């Protein structure tokens, strides 16, 4: 999905930008503190967010001067100079008039641009933005000057070692490792500190009354950087603004409940509020990730092993009828329409990785998700990511929901503690037992009788006679979708991949005789 990086020119300064999507609506995104256009393509949470955004808008993104792939002239540049960089990007991209999305410190730049060039702006979307960034007598929501100075020193001192101003509570260790590389690539320690100082000198309160385009102001109630009170104060002084306060405590746009955030943006920009899609379905999500310490270097041998492992992953995903949600250098997420298949695939992946000298840790969860072209979104993916993060190297952990569904399958589990993540339901975890582990150490879930319900047994009997889902539905006076659901449940419980396997099993157990 990555597109070429191009350059706009403002005087002698070159500004790197990318255009993503082919929708009729043009959206210019003015970023926050430090960015890097190319490294953003390596982060799955960012990609899912960008893909959803570009489904209804052609998104033009850029690295501000002094950051990412743009020129790094001496000094930070004034907010007016950086605003002119945004105008140069619009000109280079051939965009006469655009909607503008400004987030964090990009919000004041978007406001200044809309007040200065109203003929170039259709509307503004501001997320996590404030009109002022220092405390004042009439602005009590920001840190004091002394507190800010301590923060600026910490930025320069800890750059590349501690993720700063961007690690929300939804970020895990994998995200933390990416964020460190992202920030280091985006700016040097001194440049990051200088940019932070310049951003905290911004105060655009006096020009808010001069912004006459429609404005959508978005903020999360628990945002640790953009105080909800400051966001409300800004919205109240904008002549044509609508404020929407969202739940959550992530400052970063692509973390947390991004579906709610993006639905608000889409409704504002297009005039159409997305209708919940009818393609929601129950899926089992497997997340398998490399169990590599974040500070371990990615040497050539490691990269070659991971390349070979990526080929093996594709083969096993196809073998177990999975659909890849995302893949990165450190891991993969796969959706299955069968829980047992997800567990079997996780075991196959761990064995394949071990043979190549790669150690994995895996997590599995099940829940209803929405399937968009090219992506699978919603909470089960996030839960599976947290479960994988909790697994030990070489282990597969499953949630209690998965354990309950596979009761009757030839699988064994041990207790593995609790998963408690802010914003998610607390869950019991179970470790999938190794084949070599003594059975006295595990709790085995087996049934001596058929694991199928009465209705599922009736469906399996008809499968043995080669009936389609439509024919099964007519025979049993049920809907075709219900028949399809029963067939999937049978395959899930038995760990099969095809109707042929179901038919053979049903015939072996005498179910087909009543057909």
Image (tube, rainbow, N blue to C red):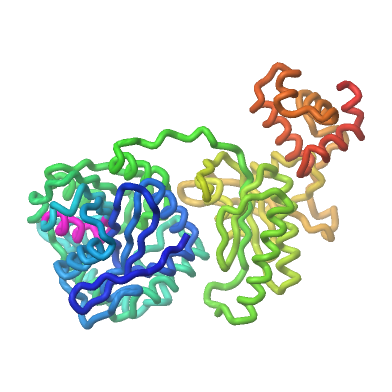
Q: Quadrant of residue 492?
A: top right
Give the x, y percent position of residue 152.
27, 74
Image quadrant containing the C terminus: top right
- Numbered-mark total: 0
Q: Is residue 106 magenta?
A: yes
Which region shows up in magenta? 102-115
Q: Is residue 126 magenta?
A: no
Q: Residue at x 31, y 48 (%)?
A: 25
One can see residue 240 in this view: yes
Left or right: 457 as drawn, with respect to 164? right
Q: Residue at x 68, y 71 (%)?
A: 308
Q: Residue at x 53, y 48 (%)?
A: 376
Left or right: 322 as drawn, with respect to 83? right
- Majority secondary structure in the magenta region: helix
One can see residue 140 in this view: no
Give the x, y percent position of residue 441.
81, 55
Give the x, y percent position of residue 99.
25, 50
Give the x, y percent position of residue 444.
80, 46
Q: Quadrant of residue 206?
A: bottom left
Q: Residue at x 92, y 35 (%)?
A: 508
Q: Quadrant of residue 468?
A: top right
Nearer to me, 336 or 399: 336
Give the answer, above or below, for where 23 lies relative to 149. above
Nearer to me, 128 or 84: 84
């Amino acid at each position: 999905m990555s597109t070429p990086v191009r350059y706009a020119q403002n005087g002698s300064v070159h500004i790197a930008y990318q255009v993503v999507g082919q929708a009729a609506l043009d959206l210019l995104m003015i970023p926050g503190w430090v960015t890097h256009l190319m490294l953003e393509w390596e982060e799955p949470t960012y990609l899912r967010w960008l893909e959803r955004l570009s489904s209804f808008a052609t998104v033009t993104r850029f690295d501000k001067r002094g950051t990412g792939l743009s020129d790094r002239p001496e000094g930070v540049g004034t907010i007016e100079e950086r605003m002119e960089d945004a105008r140069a990007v619009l000109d280079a991209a051939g965009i006469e008039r655009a909607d503008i999305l400004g987030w964090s410190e990009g919000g004041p730049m978007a406001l200044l641009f809309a007040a200065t060039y109203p003929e170039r702006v259709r509307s503004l979307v501001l997320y996590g933005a404030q009109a002022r960034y220092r405390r004042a007598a009439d602005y009590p929501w920001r840190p004091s000057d002394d507190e800010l100075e301590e923060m600026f020193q910490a930025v320069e001192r800890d750059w590349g070692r501690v993720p700063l101003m961007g690690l929300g509570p939804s970020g895990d260790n994998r995200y933390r490792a990416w964020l460190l590389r992202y920030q280091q690539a985006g700016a040097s320690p001194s440049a990051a500190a200088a940019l932070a100082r310049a951003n905290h000198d911004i105060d655009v309160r006096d020009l808010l009354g001069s912004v006459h385009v429609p404005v959508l102001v978005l903020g999360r109630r628990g945002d640790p950087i953009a105080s909800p009170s400051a966001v409300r104060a800004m919205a109240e002084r904008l002549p044509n603004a609508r404020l929407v306060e969202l739940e959550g405590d992530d400052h970063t746009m692509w973390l947390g409940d991004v579906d709610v955030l993006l639905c608000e943006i889409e409704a504002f920009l297009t005039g159409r509020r997305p209708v919940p899609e009818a393609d929601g379905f129950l899926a089992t999500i497997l997340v398998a990730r490399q169990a590599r310490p974040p500070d371990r270097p990615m040497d050539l041998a490691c990269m070659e092993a991971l390349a070979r492992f990526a080929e093996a992953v594709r083969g096993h995903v196809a073998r177990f009828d999975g659909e890849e949600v995302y893949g990165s250098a450190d891991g993969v997420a796969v959706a299955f329409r069968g829980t047992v298949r997800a567990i079997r695939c996780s075991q196959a992946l761990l064995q394949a990785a071990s043979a190549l000298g790669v150690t994995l840790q895996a997590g599995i969860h099940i829940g209803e998700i929405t399937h968009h072209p090219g992506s699978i979104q919603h909470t089960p993916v996030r839960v599976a990511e947290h479960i994988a993060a909790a697994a030990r190297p070489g282990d597969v952990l499953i949630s209690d929901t998965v354990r309950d569904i596979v009761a009757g399958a030839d699988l064994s589990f041990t207790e593995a503690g609790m998963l408690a993540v802010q914003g998610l339901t607390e869950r019991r975890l179970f470790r999938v037992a190794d084949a070599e582990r003594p059975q006295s150490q595990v709790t085995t879930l087996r049934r001596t009788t058929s694991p199928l319900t009465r209705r599922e047994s009736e469906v399996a009997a008809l499968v043995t006679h080669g009936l389609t889902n439509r024919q099964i539905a007519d025979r049993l006076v049920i809907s075709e979708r219900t028949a399809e659901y029963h067939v999937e449940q049978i395959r899930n419980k038995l760990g099969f991949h095809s109707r042929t396997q179901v038919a053979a099993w049903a015939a072996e157990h005498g179910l087909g005789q009543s057909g």
